Image (cartoon, grey):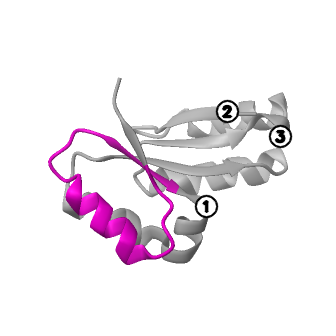
Amino acid sequence: MKLCVALDLPEKSDNLALAHTLKSEDIWLKVGLRSFIRDGKPLLEELKAINPSFKIFLDLKLHDIPNTMADAAQEIAALGVDMFNVHASSGVKAMKEVMDRLSSVPNRPLVLAVT
């Protein structure tokens, strides 16, 4: 089991400073909704530049109609993250559609359902 550190601080610079203090650790970094909306893909790239072995968990809790969730999941997979989540209340059909869409993605990220 590995430690997962949340990077949900008020400023991008705060998140990057925390990541720098952890750069020699074999851990997961969780990027939440606020941080991702504010800092986007560049934050993910900067985290990997600090330590390419960091595992990135993109915590967005996708919840929408099945096709939109599958489209979003495909785009998230293209970001190169190691894990993301969907909200289980989106329903079985939506969760299956996400997994079907990702079935042919090389190095598919782990997908968690949260309630």
| Residue bounds of the magenta highlight | 6-31
Left or right, 70 with respect to 91, comes to left
Choose the circle earlier in sequence order: 2 or 1: 1
Residue with the mark numbered 1 = 33
The vertical placement of 110 against 58, above or below, is: above
Per the image, label 2 sits on a secondary structure element best described as strand
Image point (85%, 49%), residue name: 65
Left or right, 18 with respect to 113, comes to left
Residue with the mark numbered 3 = 90
Q: Which mark is residue 93?
A: none
Q: At which x and y percent is residue 13? A: 36, 76
Q: Residues within 10 Å of mark 2 (few under 14, many from 20)?
A: some
Choose the circle earlier in sequence order: 3 or 1: 1
Image point (46%, 39%), residue name: 109
Residue with the mark numbered 2 = 113
Q: Amino acid at mark 3?
A: Ser
Res 100 visible: no
Res 66 visible: yes
Q: Amino acid at mark 1?
A: Leu
Q: At which x and y percent is residue 42? A: 39, 73
Image point (34%, 30%), residue name: 2
